Image (cartoon, rainbow, N blue to C red):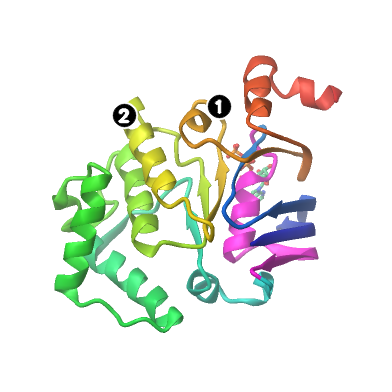
Amino acid sequence: MLKIEGLTAEVDGKPILKGIDLEVPAGEIHAIMGPNGSGKSTLSYVLSGREGYEITGGSVSFNGVDLLALEPEERAAAGLFLAFQYPVELPGVGNALFLRTALNAVRRGKGEPELDAMQFLKLARERMKALSMPEDMLKRGVNVGFSGGEKKRNEVLQMALLRPKLAILDETDSGLDIDALKIVADGVNALRAPDFSALVITHYQRLLDYIVPDKVHVLMGGRIVQSGGPELAHQLEASGYASVKAA
Ligand SMILES: Nc1ncnc2c1ncn2[C@@H]1O[C@H](COP(=O)(O)OP(=O)(O)OP(=O)(O)O)[C@@H](O)[C@H]1O
């Protein structure tokens, strides 16, 4: 599914990713943990094709395709989805129209028929119910006036509608109350399938009680410095990153 080899990238001439090697097979969920400023968000932005990041070396293969050669919208059409750490507000852009436009763009890319407003509403209501989101969130501007937790749920709604092949969740758990955490985790778990993979970036072991990862990786100083099973997250929670440095 995803194979990253020797990936290096810089921002404003400052090297941030210093040789990332990471493989996420189809059907697996991997977690990335690491101290503040270690490059976790940078990795997710580089994978999604955000402007301002210069790739200086390495390769990323996504289902056999050179991901780095694709435009951001082509990456989305190929099945990549990034749930932002800080979802942006788009005043004046209705959430329903935004979500339907995103969904239809991906459907077009896959050669599937677009959904009209009625078909979309039916699907969105169904998926929102599963996420315990009130329907009026469709009528409001994208994320405008949404609480922190509501913005994160709106990201997961997007994911539930787009049904990507690879979802990257960048600290989607931060700012969520305990009930919302479970709802969001259920949303991710519902997508588990042999052709779905996820990279879950988190600071907290707690999320990984609900989304049990196949592997946990520690990103420090722009490199993956340790990988292990779910027990690695427990070990980090107990001893912090000093134990990794010593390893
Ligand atoms: N536009 C930028 N200009 C300068 N430095 C940047 C820029 N974007 C990121 N950085 C730096 O790159 C480093 C990695 O940032 P990144 O956001 O990827 O870390 P992170 O691991 O996601 O951190 P956190 O856990 O705090 O979210 C940081 O030192 C950050 O200051």
Query: Picture coordinates of residue 195 (x, y %)?
Result: 53, 61
Q: Which residue is mark 1?
A: 205
- Does 46 sit above or below residue 66? above
Q: Secondary structure at mark 1?
A: loop
Query: Picture coordinates of residue 31 (x, y %)?
Result: 60, 40
> In this image, 17 relative to 165: left or right?
right
Residue range highlighted in magenta: 36-63
Image quadrant where one finds the C terminus: top right
Question: Residue 214, can we see it?
Answer: yes
> In this image, 141 relative to 5: left or right?
left
**Counting other residues with Cα less than 10 Å from the Cα at mark 1, is it few (<14), some (14-19), or many (20 or more)?**
many
Considering depth in this image, is 104 or 111 the residue closer to the camera?
Answer: 111
Asked if residue 56 lies in the magenta stretch, the reply is yes
Residue at 29% x, 39% y is 147
Q: CA distance from mark 2 to mark 1?
A: 16 Å
Quarter of the rendered image showing ligand 1? top right
Residue at 43% x, 46% y is 188
Say whether mark 1 is within 8 Å of ligand 1.
Answer: no
Q: Which residue is mark 2?
A: 179
- Does 163 sit above or below residue 68? above
Residue at 38% x, 64% y is 162
Question: Residue 50, can we see it?
Answer: no
Residue at 57% x, 63% y is 48
Residue 229 occupies which quadrant of the picture? top right
Query: Picture coordinates of residue 185 (x, y %)?
Result: 41, 39
Q: Amino acid at mark 2?
A: Asp
